Every structure is written in structure tokens, then in C-alpha cells.
Amino acid sequence: MEKPVIIGVGYTRIGEHWEKSLRDLAVEAALMALDNAGVNRVDAIYVSNMMSGALQDQEHLGSLIATYLGLKGTPACKVEAACASGGMAIHQAFLAVSSGYYDTVLIVGVEKMTDKLTSEVTFALAMAEDREYVVSTGATFVGLNALLYRLYLTKFNVGQKSIAKFPVIAHENALNAPHAQLKRKISVEDVLSSPIIADPIRLLECAPIGDGAAALVISSPEVAKESPKDTYIEIAGSAAATDIMSLHERLDLLTLFASVKAAQKAYKMAKVKPSDVDVLEVHDAFSILAPIALEDLGFAKKGEGWKMIENMDVSLSGKLPTNTMGGLKARGHPVGATGIYQAVDAILQLKGEAGKNQVDNPTLALLQSTGGVGGTVVVNILKRG
Amino acid sequence: MEKPVIIGVGYTRIGEHWEKSLRDLAVEAALMALDNAGVNRVDAIYVSNMMSGALQDQEHLGSLIATYLGLKGTPACKVEAACASGGMAIHQAFLAVSSGYYDTVLIVGVEKMTDKLTSEVTFALAMAEDREYVVSTGATFVGLNALLYRLYLTKFNVGQKSIAKFPVIAHENALNAPHAQLKRKISVEDVLSSPIIADPIRLLECAPIGDGAAALVISSPEVAKESPKDTYIEIAGSAAATDIMSLHERLDLLTLFASVKAAQKAYKMAKVKPSDVDVLEVHDAFSILAPIALEDLGFAKKGEGWKMIENMDVSLSGKLPTNTMGGLKARGHPVGATGIYQAVDAILQLKGEAGKNQVDNPTLALLQSTGGVGGTVVVNILKRG
């Protein structure tokens, strides 16, 4: 069966958009994607968002965004899987187009986080974890990731400076990304001397809070062939998986089971293997998640992902350029939009439109979208046709 | 193309479940559905819920419920379309199975509303409307529906007692529904002498606040045929539509455009017409929504839906038995679960398992799931094979 293709991308700059509302951002990205696709109608809309209820007192984003796009009538709903909402919305749109009932689908990922106090945003983000048994103890996501980090350093006898290189590369990449939130160079020394947020996680190892929206237009291969473009981006593989939600019930803290499972399924569907991947997007909400992702996705053996960072394999000129526009750390992490930004950044690479960050002729990209501490992971594999 | 079929149903009683958490309710309904279907594995889980973020400080229900069902690994996400979340989750599961990528899918609709103050629940429910331009003015859903009600009575020169018969029939039906929340007989006089909530809406014309969960197992026709059952419930038609979200921008307040559009599409897909429908489930959050639904879904001319109520056409012995277990008004309206309860109640009828409320040999059921004041409507048509 031929797979759905992505025919349009749109996105806003990520940052503190105090002059724009959630719907303004969503509409801006969506219109850009529709324009980029060259279509003026869609059969369905998927909105990926996690926290509009908590931060904007607003649900029913499907109807709201359809209304503000002037697309009255179009079926629309919100898809939520915590920080994996974006990857999950791509997966749902993939299924919808594959069903044959929808030919052209718009995905809009959006999150507006800077209108509230950081404490309120932290509280809202914690809704991705088990409120009754984990969050109630005072645990936060940075705290939970700190547990993984400490264990990783100890178990694999790694120095933090190897992992701290990841955000340094991310910031380097973001310098030339027009939509990135944090456009400034940092050094490993900057990272390791930045304030401790939850030991051993330093401030410069954490993704920032930001506002943003990104959008994709996905169509059936038949529709895409009617208006052929130079490049043809197929969703060659798309798979989601869950894990036991909370760390305290998992057997192995340093393997995100959902990441392994989703990746295996996506590779099989796309008929590719890790060594075929040219550009990679991993969910680096905290720096420790990068080496773990490299391992779980099959690019490094367990306990050796850090070496790919240490060796600069993940830099733009390395053998596996990763998060080429800065990833969550520097491009930014407006939660519900993040998985869509990953697709946008990968597609810019696949189409040769990545400007100064362009890597050499990539044809295959893998996107890892993670919710909670891996309670959900979605892996989408994009292929230039 | 053969359509997906529903092979299992599960549900909890609706009420004030102070002794059970949201996850307890979801698991109870899901296990019953899996047992009813006779399967012990599913390929994906869709959770329909609107307000867990606002009322339980909990998102990421996909991972949470997969965890508590012991279904680690299974892809899972939340689908939200305000009060139409349930119908929308059925639609998404319909697409997922139709895609060929998933054979057996579990849908769990759940909402837990009674742990909070009524004012907090009212605030959370209002997230289905436009917070910035409508809710900010002080409007509530009962207030918005009161506008429709007043206009309907005036424009079509109808007496309120005709419409007030609808909740009377609903309460009558709920008497024999084991899972119903409000099991007591009421009269038209009771309705019209109950307190005014928003003029002209009376207390006994409003659906109650409640907790509950309902679940369905949906499979491909191929899988269903492997373990044949006496009855075979096909999702013959499934369609969603949106409308301009807020009333003040609509041209015609008394027609829910999304309801008309979704119904037309679903009828076409199912190759049936309104007169083929044997049992009906409408979204009667307020009594006025019943006559409007009867009109929009093609059972009555515009302005004449009230006559079907006045004539008792919608009662169990009428020509179009509607909300046969009490509907939102009396069976109950735990928001994210409501659209799933509609399917459960219709399937009990189609399978001849509706007990004292059984209508004579129905083969076709139509379910209308509405979000906001019709900002989203999903219509699913179920057919006994």
C-alpha cells in the first residue's frame, strides 16, 4: 500500500508571543502550510495540543481553529498524548488518509505557554505524569529526568561533560534557524556552570518554555501526484507505543520501552534500518534524553549513546546530524507543536531548504516524539521520493 | 469497502462515584468491553475525555489507561472534541481500523465530574466555547441554549410544554436502564414548575453532572468473522463536521449546520435515509436540543421537530424510539463518555438486550454526538448485520 505524503509545511517563530493568541499562532502556521501545499481546502483537521485547557481555559480547539481558518464544516478534533501530541497527530492523520476516507488533512500543532507564571506551566506540564501517585509526591519532570541522568552517569561511568555537549550542538544549530527560540552560542563550560535545576540537570540542559505553532498538510499519494512537485515526502513509517506511565513501576529505567517498540514497528513499516537514517529528530526536553534516544532508536548500543555526542556524530557534519535546527533545547519546545516542528525541520532538510544548516542530500529522516518520561513515544519516518 | 464492526461493549453505572477514580471507572468499562468482545489484546486505544486536565489535573490519559489496563506498549491517545469527544473517538477508531493498520481497537470514554464544586465544573464545561470572546462575557452553556430555546418557542409559535415532554420520556426510559443516573418518573408539570436555570430553561430540562465510563471494542470485519457471533454490529456510516464555534457569528441559530452536514455524509456512506432509522440517540444536554436534532437529522421539517415529541413519536412505543435508556437527561452525561454510552445503548437495542426497554427488532441506529452548541457534531450509524 502506498503511504500518505506531506505536501505542505508551515510554522511560526518560537518565542514569547505576547502579542498573539493561541488561535493567532495556529492560524498563521496553518495558512502557511496550506499555501505551501498549494491547496485551499482540506478534508479534516487534527489539532495537536496538550495544555490549552490548563493554560488558556480553552478546549474544543478543533472547532475553534476550523472557525478561525474559515474552514466551517471541516471535521476537526484535538489529539493529546502529552509532549508526544505532535507525533501522535501525525500518526492519526497518517491513519485517516490511509483509510481512504480523507484525501487531504491539515495538522496544526500549537501551544501557548508564556502567558502564565512558570509555576503554573510546571504544574500544567506535570499533568503528563500520574497526578495521584507521582505528582502528588512533589515530583516534577525535571526531577524525574534527573533520576535517569544520575543513574546513567553512574551505571555507564560517563562524565556529564559528554552529555552536556548535546545542548551545545543544539544551540550551534539554532543560530541559523530562523524560527528558533534560543539563538546564541553556548559552551560546555556554560552548560556545566549554569544553575542546577534538579541535580545533576543544569539550566542549559533543559528545553525552554515557549509559544509556537507548526502545521503540515498530508495527502494521499493519488492527490499528491495530481499536482506533482519536485520533492515528494512520504510518511514511510508511522508507529506509536506506550510504556508503563511512571518510572517507579518500570523494570529498566534507562530504556524507554515505548521508544524501542515504536521505532521497531516504524522501521519495519518503512522497510529501513537505523543505518539508513540520514537526519534525526529526538525529543531532547532534557539533555539526558538524547543519548537514551540514540540507544533506543538503534543508533548506539545501550550505554554508548553518549559516545555519539562526545564524538560529534550528531552534529551537522557528523555521521548522523540530529536536531539540525536546534531541537527542543534551542529551536524550542511549545509542547503540542513540538512533534510538528520536528517534521518541519526534517522536511526542510529533505527538500534541501535548510539554508546554512543543510546537510548533504538526505533522503530519510526519523522523528521521535516523546510524552511524559516515555509513557508515550511516536516514531515517524519520512522519505524523500 | 467493508466497514469496521463493534464486537464488545462495556459501561459503568453513571452517578456520583466518590469511591472510584477516573482510572478506576475507565478500567472497569474497558475490561467489561474486552470481556464482552472475547478478546484479550487490542492494537490501539482511543480515550475520549474532555475535562481531565481541568478536573483531575491529569492529561496523558492514553498512557495512564493503557498502564492500568496492563496493556503496556499498546498505542494510545486522547481524542477531544468537547462534548462530542465520544462520537469523535468512534470516528477516529473507525478510520484507524479502516486504514488496515489496526485490526482491533479499544475506545474508552470517561469523565469524572462530581469531585469538584458545580461552579468548577461549569467553568470547565465552558472550555467548549470561545473563552476569549464568549465565555469572558459571562455566558454559560445553559445560557446559550436558553437563547436557542427562546427563539425556537417564538419563531415556531410552540408552547414550552411540548418540548418539556422530552425529559419526561427520558426519565420514563431511564427507570429500566440499570446504568442510568436519574431513575425517577417526572411529569410535564414537574418540569415546568422546576426552578428556572436560564430563562426559559428549567432545571428538569438540563442533563445532570455525573461520573461514568463506557467502552467499545471495534474490529475489522475480517477479525470479527473469525469469531462469529449471533449479532454483527457494523459502523455503516461515520462522519464528523464543525460549525462556526460561537452563536453570534452564525446566520441561522436554529439549525446546527454541523449536525446537518455530518448526518448527510453519514447517511450517504451508510446508503440509508432517515426513514430507515429504527432507534435514535440525540445529544439532549438541554431539552431544546432534541427537537432541533430531530430536524437537523432529517426526521422532521425545520420548526416541526417539537411535534414528534408532542405526538410521542420519540417514546419507546413511538415510530422513532429516541434515547431509549434515558439519554443525556436521565441516563446521564459524563461528558467524554457520553458519545460512547450512546453507542452502548443503541447496541443493546440492536442486539435485543435492552430488557424492558427493548423496541421491536431494530436493525439501524443513528447516534448524534454534539460538542459545544454544535461547534462539532459527529454522526455514527450502526447496523445490525
Image (cartoon, coloured by chain):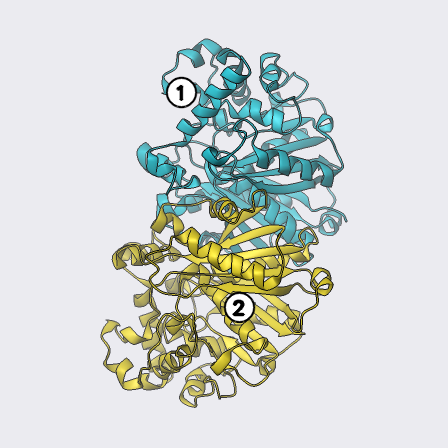
Chain colours: A yellow, B cyan
| Amino acid at the residue labelled 2 | Ala
User: Residue A360 appears at what percent x and percent y?
Assistant: 56, 86
Dot 1 lies on which element? helix
Q: What is the x, y in percent for residue A22? A: 40, 53
Checking the image for residue A343, the label placed there is 2
Q: Position of residue A145 (x, y in %)?
A: 34, 69
- Chain ID of residue with mark 1: B
Circle on res. B203: 1
Q: Give coordinates of residue A81: x percent, y percent.
A: 47, 57
Real-space Cα separation, disc 2 to disc 1, in angstroms: 50 Å
Please, is residue B169 above or below residue B67 in the view? above
Q: Residue at x 31, y 71 (%)?
A: A146
Q: Is residue B313 above or below residue A250?
A: above
Q: Are marks 2 and 1 in contact (CB under 8 Å)?
A: no
Secondary structure under the numbered disc 2 in the rendered image: helix
Residue A353 horizontal side relative to residue B271, left or right = left
